[in-house]
Every structure is written in C-alpha cells, then in structure tokens.
C-alpha cells in the first residue's frame, strides 16, 4: 500500500499497538508502562543529594575558575586543552568546574579544574 492508493488512510490506528513491546504487553494483559513502578524505581520528583553543588555553583557564579586559571598561568603551571587532556588522562567523572581523572602515565587518580570558554583544564590535584 502506498500513499497514492485510494485505500491509503493517513490517520493512525490508535487501537493497534505501535511496537512489538506494546503488542507483547497487550497479549500478556499487562500495561505498557507502570508509572508507579517507574516513579519508585527512578525516584521521580526526588532531588539528588549533592553536598558539593552549592559550593560548585558559587565558584562558577563568582568567576573563581577564571581567576584560578590566571593564577595557574602566572605560576607557569601546566594546563591542558581538551585534546591534550585526552592524551594524558582518562576522564572518570564530571561536576563543573571539576573533572575527575586518572593519569595514564601512572594511574594516579585526581581532579582538574576547568574553565568553560575557553575550555582549559588546570590545577591537577592528586587524590589522597
């Protein structure tokens, strides 16, 4: 059937399942989605608890990463672009303005601070 046939109906059939998953759920007599299960499983409407969020937001709002970068550059300490970061580190996690990394040369885990624009990573702090 093509859209040029007289029998073509552009209106979808809402009674027909739209996927195999829905068809299997219909055959088993189960609803496609159990909203209560989803809420409980994914803890919908519950904020995640991040004790560092307020401090990190404050750092970004006050421009601390840019000031820290200026200090790093003045001290001639190492900085990394995204490309050089990927060569020297594996990124494990991200929580602006920090990334958690593992140094490829020796496996040392630590954090780097970064600025958004321009994207520069700096201030490697090894984990204790």
Image (cartoon, grey):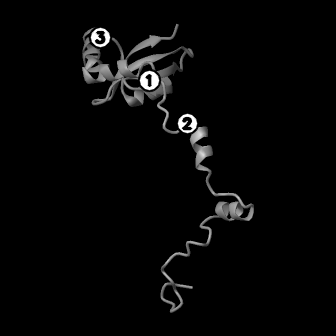
In the image, residue 57 above or below residue 20: above
Mark 1 sits on what residue? 99
Label of residue 43 in the image = 2
Mark 1 → mark 2, Cα distance in angstroms: 26 Å
Question: Hey, which quadrant is residue 21 in on the image?
Answer: bottom right
Is 96 or 110 nearer to us in this picture? Answer: 96
Q: Which of 21 and 64 is in front in this view?
A: 21
Sooner in the amino-acid sequence: mark 1 or mark 2: 2
Where residue 25 appears, x then y in whole percent? 69, 60
Residue ID for mark 3: 76
Q: Residue at x 57, y 38 (%)?
A: 42
Dot 2 or dot 3, earlier in sequence: 2
- Sequence-earlier tag: 3 or 1: 3
Disc 2 versus disc 3: nearer the observer: 2
Residue appearing at x 44%, y 23% in the figure:
99
Residue located farthest toward the bottom when viewing the structure as drawn: 6
């Amino acid at each position: 059937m093509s859209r040029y046939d007289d029998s073509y109906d552009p209106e979808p059939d809402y009674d027909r399942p739209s996927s195999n998953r829905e068809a299997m759920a219909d055959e088993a007599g189960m609803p496609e989605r159990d909203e209560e299960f989803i809420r409980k499983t994914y803890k919908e409407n519950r904020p995640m608890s991040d004790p560092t969020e307020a401090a990190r937001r404050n750092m970004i709002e006050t421009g601390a990463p840019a000031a820290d970068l200026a200090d790093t550059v003045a001290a001639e300490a190492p900085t990394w672009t995204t490309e050089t970061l990927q060569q020297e580190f594996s990124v494990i996690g991200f929580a602006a303005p920090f990334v958690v990394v593992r140094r490829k040369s020796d496996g040392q885990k630590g954090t780097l601070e970064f600025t958004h624009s321009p994207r520069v990573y700096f201030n490697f702090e090894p984990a204790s």
